[in-house]
Image: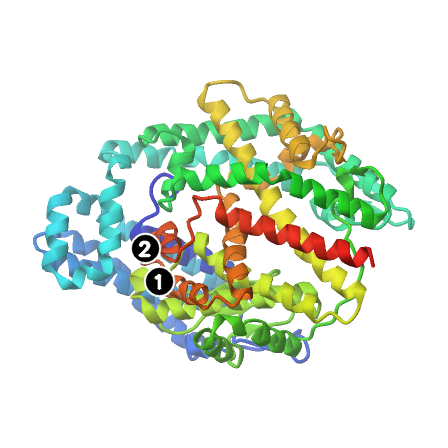
Amino acid sequence: MKNQKKYGLRFLLVIGSIVTLLMASSINAYAEDKEGQVRWDLTDLFANDAAWEQAFTEIQTKIKALADDQKGFGKSAANIATVFENQYGALQDFYRVSLYASLSNDEDQRDAATQERRAKVGALGTQFSEATSWFDPALMTLGEKKLLKYLKQEKRLAPYDKYIEDLIEGAPHVLDEKGEALMASVGAVTSRPNQIYSLLANADIEWKDVTMSDGKTVTISQAGYSGARSSANREDRKKVFDTFFGTWKNYEDSMGAILASEVQSNIFQAKARNYDSVLQKELSQENLPEAVYRTLVSEVNNSLPTLHRYFKLRGRILGVDQMRYYDIYPPLVEMDTDFSVEASKEITLEVLKPLGDEYNAHLKTALDSNWAHVYPQPGKRSGAYMNGSAYGLHPYVLLNHNDDYNSLSTYAHEWGHAVHTMLAQEEQPFSKAFYSTFTAEIASTINEILLEEHLIANAETKQEKLFYLGQALESIRGTFFRQTMFAEFELAIHEVGERNEPLTGAVLTKMYEELLKKYHGHDQGVLLIEEPYTMEWAYIPHFYYDFYVFQYATSISGAAWFAEKFLKGDESARDALITVLKKGGSDDAYSILKDAGLDMATPEPYQALVRRMENVMDRIEALLDE
């Protein structure tokens, strides 16, 4: 998938076998279930484990039969339609089998039986890929003219028109049989930098301990750093930063060699597939114009004075005269929050009323149903997700609700994904129902913004209002500015590689230092960047995900654009958003948003988010000046 355009069945298979395999649960209650646990009902998928085993056997047979469709393939439009139907029918069945296995494991990942089911599904996904690997090359041998003629002739091909059109569009980047075989053989090599980085960063680095001001000893590993960097004690924060990034500094040369290898791997693949650049290749996966990426970076750079204003405001609230990099993470206002699941449900229903009757009817159905596994418990997968791969059924949501503000925000976010899935699957056939990350995160982040505004408006005390305003600011800083800084760094290092200039650890540190200082106003004295904090680039795993992080920034910007209109009572914007949700994956994500009036290649969505940030700071300063 990494090597060429993510069109069609192979992309859907990856979504089904990887994304759904990030999930999990079991029908049988565990002895260690949290008292009062709210559980999802997996009998909607299969009545019991025996029914799943039977379905698994049946899908195995179907998958084996898919390879036989190669015989006589392409002799008619009807023949091609039948093969499409066979493959997508098997894929839909595979998704359900996969979903049951993953959900049943995520509820308790220690359970041997569910581990085995999950492993079986993983192997089955590989068999599916092998059984259908002939399909795209066989389609391409028919040629564009014949494929388009078949599309006009056979109505049964209508659900697969985008698949075929994407295949035709991607043809210049698909090699001949020998070339594709070669690319497949080097796949194990090109994936190694990420694997090596993961091993070194997560297993082999020797982390140091520090003694905090309260006398506690903390190992400043990645987890220890994340937990300790927001300490209220400034000397503790400095100690944590110095220790953590000082450790990374010891590995500067090694980390530089690994990231340089990742860059060279990406350049090789882009050249081999006839792309002008790595950026062009990666954005082509979603048919995104380069203007989206470059406009984002440009607008964020234009908006750095707004970020610098935030750092000055943060210093004022924290009582720090000279802000430094270790002053970013402490909360602006400390406050204990208490939101039960029942309160999260009630607030989410209230907050999302501006999205209209249709949206809220779906939301209420979802929240009133047994589609979620709610509380933490021993062995349960951490984090939260929505899985909507069981087309024609309903989405499932995993939460780890801790009855705090973050749990409430996550609740609204994940159910936003769920309603998106419900609307898309009602409107689109299976082949077009699965949507892009580019639109998915807009749909869920809108909910977070509406939630923030609701909580700010209904705050009962000055401290409470400041807390929620501060949460909104940090969301924008971390998602818009920080992720775009990463995106700018990623683009810069690939452009250096494409010019055949050396990328060493020292070079990478210098490049990252320049960005850190620019973004944080170092030269203006806004926030000082010091050694060894410029080693932060080595800590960021996203640089091995190949031009992915920018979508966090575009998503919050698109969400702010819609939310700004909702909050002004613009019903046309609401209707446009609902249309976006219903379109699912029926078109390219950029085109779907553009049809709704949101052009992510223009400055407007990014400026909408900056306007929101300025407005939030205006409100904070007004409260502080009272």
Figure quadrant of residue 462: bottom right
- The answer to the question of whether label 1 and label 2 lie on touching residues, with beta carbons closer than 8 A, is yes
Say which residue appears at 53% left-offset and 51% top-offset: 557
Look at the numbered disc 1 and give the secondary structure of its residue.
Answer: helix
- Residue 583's label in the rendered image is 1
Secondary structure under badge 2? loop
Work out whether 93 lies above or below 439.
Answer: below
Check disc 2 and give the amino acid type. Answer: Asp
Given the image, on which type of amino acid does mark 1 rest?
Lys
Quadrant for the C terminus, please.
Answer: bottom right
The one of 181 and 305 positioned closer to us in this rendering: 305
Q: How many residues crowd around disc 2 within 10 Å: few (fewer than 14), some, or many (20 or more)? A: some
Let me know if residue 198 appears in the view.
no
Residue 573 percent coordinates (x, y)? 45, 63
Identify the image quadrant of the N terminus: top left
Q: Cα distance, mark 1 to mark 2?
A: 7 Å
The vertical placement of 152 against 549, above or below, is: below
Residue 574 in the image: x percent, y percent?
45, 66
Q: Which residue is mark 2?
A: 587
Q: Position of residue 439 (x, y in %)?
A: 44, 56
The answer to whether residue 8 is left or right of residue 118 is: left
Q: Residue at x 46, y 73 (%)?
A: 359
Position of residue 299 relative to residue 457, above or below, is: above
Task: Determine which quarter of the picture holds residue 238.
Answer: top right
Q: Using residue 11 as the reference point, say whether residue 624 is left or right of it.
A: right
Q: Position of residue 279 (x, y in %)?
A: 42, 35
Q: Pick the residue in front: 62 or 209.
A: 209
**Viewer-closest of 566 and 243:** 566
Between 539 and 594, the one nearer to me in the picture: 594
Answer whether residue 362 is visible to the viewer in this image: yes
